[in-house]
Image (spheres, rainbow, N blue to C red):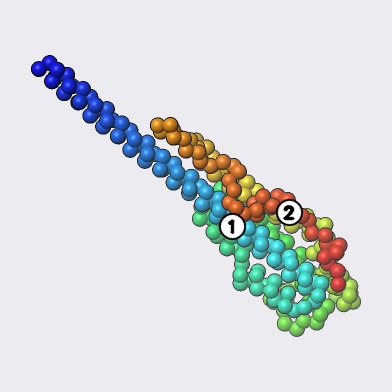
Amino acid sequence: MKRKIKIQSISAWSIGIALILTVVFVVVLHNGQSKVKRFEDATDQYIVCENAARQLQDGSDYLTEQVRLYAMTGERKYLDQYFEEADVTKRREQALESLKKYFDKTETFQSLQQAMEDSKELMSTEYHSLKFVATAMGEKEIPAELEQLDLSEEEMQLSQKEKLEKAQELVCNNEYQNARGTITKEVSGCLDQSVARKDEKTSAESKYDLFGYVFEVGNSNYDTGDSFADNLHDRKKIDCSTVCLL
């Protein structure tokens, strides 16, 4: 009789321990899944940031390319393509809009926003260059932005060759190139802030241990398989002395 009671007591303890372990396992598993989900969200947000940074940089680079080609060749298509990007395609504006969804009012967003503002400010120099070329080439129909921009009397007295040389100088001198370098640094800063944000979210949750299994998540060297983020810091300056020649 005593043996039967002892067996029943052991069985009850076994069942109780099994139930407790089951509950613990379910709680830890759910917690682990939540951590993985948060890491995935942080990674997705980083990818959004990288894509936005790339898009803004590409838009800015494209505008520079078109204004320089117009100054070099005087071909109307480059003028049209410049304003197609600036007024219709608007890659820079789209980049900010996509980043705002996850990063509004963060340092990440502010860095890219500053890059956008500096890129827009640089357009005043680009407009001046475009106006020189349009005037030199005798363009009859030009965008409203250029219509509203008047060359000085001294500038109007320049010969066609001199106007084209001025146009090239404006978008190839050190001041212009330094301004572009600042934009690149701000885009890079956006990515740096995004990495820091991702690391901050995942550092406290980078590991959890359950019955000997350790799940490693996230680190600052996350590789998206795209060299854009790494190469952005090492962008080479364009040699304007050879690029901007007729």
Q: Quadrant of residue 122?
A: bottom right
Q: Residue at x 77, y 71 (%)?
A: 69
Q: Which residue is mark 2?
A: 235
Callout 2: 10 Å neighbours few (<14), some, many (20+)? few
> Residue 70 occupies which quadrant of the picture?
bottom right
User: Contact (CB < 8 A) between labels 1 and 2?
Assistant: no
- Compare marks 1 and 2 and give the one earlier in the sequence: 1
Residue 117 at least partly seen: no
In the displayed structure image, the side of residue 9 where residue 157 appears, left or right = right
In the image shown, does 47 or 111 lie closer to the viewer? 47
Above or below: residue 63 compared with residue 237: below
**Where does the N terminus fall, quadrant-wise?**
top left
Across and down, in percent, residue 38 comes to: 46, 45
Mark 2 falls on what kind of element?
A: loop
Give the residue type that dot 2 points to. Arg
Tell me the quarter of the image containing the C terminus. bottom right
Specify whether 129 is left or right of 144: right
Identify residue for label 1: 51
Lateral position of residue 241 relative to residue 81, left or right: right
**Element assignment for label 1:** helix
Front residue of 70/26: it is 26
Percent from the top left, x then y, of residue 31?
Answer: 39, 39
Q: What residue sits 75% from the left and 79% below the top?
A: 76
Mark 1 residue type: Asn
The image shows a total of numbered marks equal to 2
Q: Which of these two is toward me, 97 or 200?
A: 200
Q: Give me the disc on residue 211.
A: none
Would residue 84 be seen by someone viewing this image from the given angle?
A: yes
Distance of label 1 from label 2 (alpha carbons): 17 Å
Instruction: Report the residue at 83% width, 78% height from top.
Output: 136
Q: Residue at x 70, y 55 (%)?
A: 183
